[in-house]
Amino acid sequence: MMAVSSGSKEGGGSKVMMDNGKYVRYTPEQVEALERLYHECPKPSSLRRQQLIRDCPILSNIEPKQIKVWFQNRRCREKQRKEASRLQAVNRKLTAMNKLLMEENDRLQKQVSHLVYENTFFRQHTQQNQAALATTDTSCESVVTSGQRNLTPQHPPRDASPAGLLSIAEETLAEFLSKATGTAVEWVQMPGMKPGPDSIGIVAISHGCPGVAARACGLVGLEPARVAEILKDRLSWYRDCRTVDVLNVMSTGNGGTIELLYMQLYAPTTLAPGRDFWLLRYTSLLEDGSLVVCERSLNNTQNGPAMPAVQHFVRADMMPSGYLIRPCEGGGSIIHIVDHIILEPWSVPEVLRPLYESSMLLAQRTTMAALRHLRQISQEVSQPSVSGWGRRPAALRALSQRLSKGFNEAVNGFTDDGWSLLESDGIDDVTLLVNSSPSKMMGANLGYNGGGFASVTSSVLCAKASMLLQNVPPAILLRFLREHRSEWADSSIDAYSAAAIKAGPCNLPGVRAGGFGGQVILPLAHTIEHEEFMEVIKLENMGYYRDDMTIPGDVFLLQLCSGVDENAVGTSAELIFAPIDASFSDDAPILPSGFRIIPLDSTSDAASPNRTLDLASALEVGTAGSKAGGENSSHSGSTKSVMTIAFQFAFEVHLQDNIATMARQYVRSIIASVQRVSLALSPSRFGSQNAFHLPPGTPEAQTLARWISSSYRFYLGVELLKSEGNEPILKSLWHHTDAVLCCSLKALPVFTFANQAGLDMLETTLVALQDITLEKIFDDNGKKTLCSEFPQIMQQGFMCIQGGICLSSMGRPVSYERAVAWKVLNEEETAHCICFMFINWSFV
């Protein structure tokens, strides 16, 4: 046992209790020297520390054991301080969360009381109307008089004077607070959100109010002034925001600020115009110290300031919305966010109206985006080492903003950005735009080539389209597009895009030559909740596709991905990428292309996002085939989404016609690939004629599992599966800890089935599995062994393979202790397929 006491009364210093119970006292000078040594060499076994101790005369009369004990106590005190600080921070957070929950509970109680009162009032009013129905005066005069009374405005008209604007601002503040903390809007908890200490906060959406509205409450570790500064800078966090112009600023007598803003929002698809807003923003400080930033549209104010309509935009209304920011004890802020807008859904095609009538989509893309951005900034300030955005979070965020903004510009194609429409080829499925403006070229930095030479590329062509998808969850489809780029991308186009943004000239890409090069995903950064991440895609062995193009052997893509979580409700999914230079410099050219998938009916079916394409969903009972199929059909019919595709190509002006033809064909081929993949991933297509696409409760899947098990027992003399009780054989095979994979008996064997462990090992899905050949998963040594031993499998019926290395579909090495291969015999005792079992596998 040992204890420490600091700062003794006798001349300062400290004393340490040794194991023998005696105290050793140190002078202040010795303590100072020991502290200096501790900070210079914190590791106890440091040779440098021992050298410094020997070189320090003031410590020469202290025994090494005593110094060791002092350092041990010093480390204990530091750990105690860190733990105490952490516990204090957790306690402050829990106290603030408790306060927030209590306030939310009070608001809900008020809302319940208000609804009960309204219900009682309406009942009484209905009874009175029924009793007085026979004596009610229904003359035209009374009806007209009553209508005139109802049309009388309750508030005096507002004008553009400072007093009029202040009156509008105060009215906006009152209405906003009634939504943020009162009962002006009936809020219901957003489906899929689970409040708790680790959650993003309390998120709710409106029920029964005009337009769409969302509300969020949460804690952030930033001071109120800093929170307000971040939120008012919409361009830094709101990806759908194109521009915010502050046209006028005036101060109020109470210390507040009134601003007149004009804001434009990008359209999420190619099928509808963008939205713009003419706003008044009021920033003020409440009596309790809370900071409020509230906004509303000025469209309907009489004699107020006006903003003329802008071409290519539909003027939308923002009802009183904003941010209530309250300081928290011990630092940080409690924030209430309210977004309430009317997006004029009448102006879009009927199929898209759910996008403009969904409060859930507003919550995901706007309200929660603000809260997530604040939490990200807060963590970067407090814990920079675990923020997920590396050592340069601001630079990485700027890159993600460039990717998102560039993609939005391509999707919208505004004329004031320099885009002009090209003539159609008679089929209107793909829209082509061209941009030759100097601002576009400077914005993309297309003159950069990493070597100081200006590129001759002078224009950008965009090919874009939108398509309706059914019966496939956006998260599953987007994850497939990300992980299996070879299913839809053309390697020669990727190579051309990489070469076109560097030094030219470069020729047009030809048709695909050879196979797709390897794809390696290199993680770069991610947000706190991993709802968005950025990565670098390395496409290997690309140099041989075009002998006449000066390009490197590898192509690098900067990629931004979001919305791949199947459990998130109503989330849009995006996959945006752009070719970059291998040096990855800050001024590297970026021309983003990609996909955006937005669910159209997220509010109608909140229970069905977790649809996975594996066998597990139907393994609950042995004869669940019809039941599983019924469940799939009941959910799949309600899944609709719209996909937006946009691809940009840099080119020389004289090649415009050729590039236009190539781009149109390429996007059409991508559309066809997406349709094919969507059909394969659709739960409603799970019951096709292919035996391995069937739900596992059907006889085909059960029969295959029985053949695999009986053949293993026949050739190796032991049981493969240890079924418990009446547990189905298929369920036991599916949950087997070792990877079990079946491949066809063809000249080029391909995989036809895998259990869950096999899919995990190959990092693929059941549909994509059938595109993987047997030889693709083995390295060179494995291929030699397989070629030499394969005849033994066909003659003897089985073979044991020594441990080695194989590869997943993503190119990751997988080690296995040993493997067993055997023939799978059908009921006629003829070979149906070859089965492999990889035992004790793990990623290297």
Image (cartoon, helix red, strand yellow):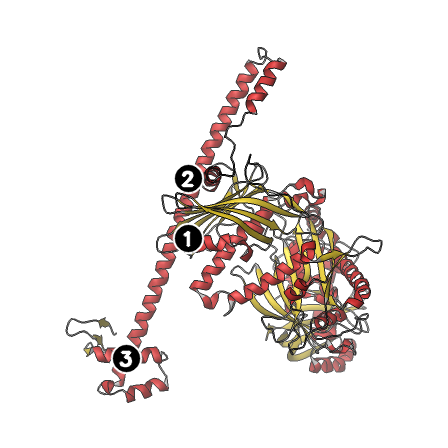
State yes or no: discs 3 and 2 in contact (Cβ < 8 Å): no
The image quadrant where one finds the N terminus is: bottom left
Query: Judging from the image, what secondary structure is the residue with disc 3 in?
Result: helix
Q: Which comes sooner in the sequence, label 3 or label 2?
A: 3
Q: Position of residue 429 (x, y in %)?
A: 79, 53
Mark 3 crowdedness (10 Å alpha carbons): few <14, some 14-19, many ≥20: many
Q: Position of residue 219 (x, y in %)?
A: 44, 53
Q: Give the spatial CA distance, label 2 vs label 1.
A: 23 Å
Residue on which the image places disc 2: 106
Q: Along the line of sight, which residue is nearer the eye, 608 or 454? A: 454
Q: Position of residue 126 (x, y in %)?
A: 55, 20
Disc 3 marks a residue whose amino acid type is Leu
Question: Where, by quadrant of the figure, is residue 177 drawn?
Answer: top left
Q: Give the spatial CA distance, label 3 vs label 2.
A: 55 Å
Q: Which comes sooner in the sequence, label 2 or label 1?
A: 2
**Among all residues in the image, which is located at the extreme front?**
161
Residue found at x 42% / y 44%: 252
Left or right, 396 with reference to 458: left
Disc 1 marks a residue whose amino acid type is Pro
Mark 1 crowdedness (10 Å alpha carbons): few <14, some 14-19, many ≥20: many
Disc 2 marks a residue whose amino acid type is Asp
Q: Position of residue 747 (x, y in %)?
A: 82, 74
Query: Judging from the image, what secondary structure is the residue with disc 2 in?
Result: helix
Residue on which the image places disc 3: 34
Residue 191, compared with residue 449, is above or below; it is above
Question: Where, by quadrant of the figure, is residue 133 drawn?
Answer: top right
Q: Along the line of sight, which residue is nearer the eye, 111 or 137? A: 137
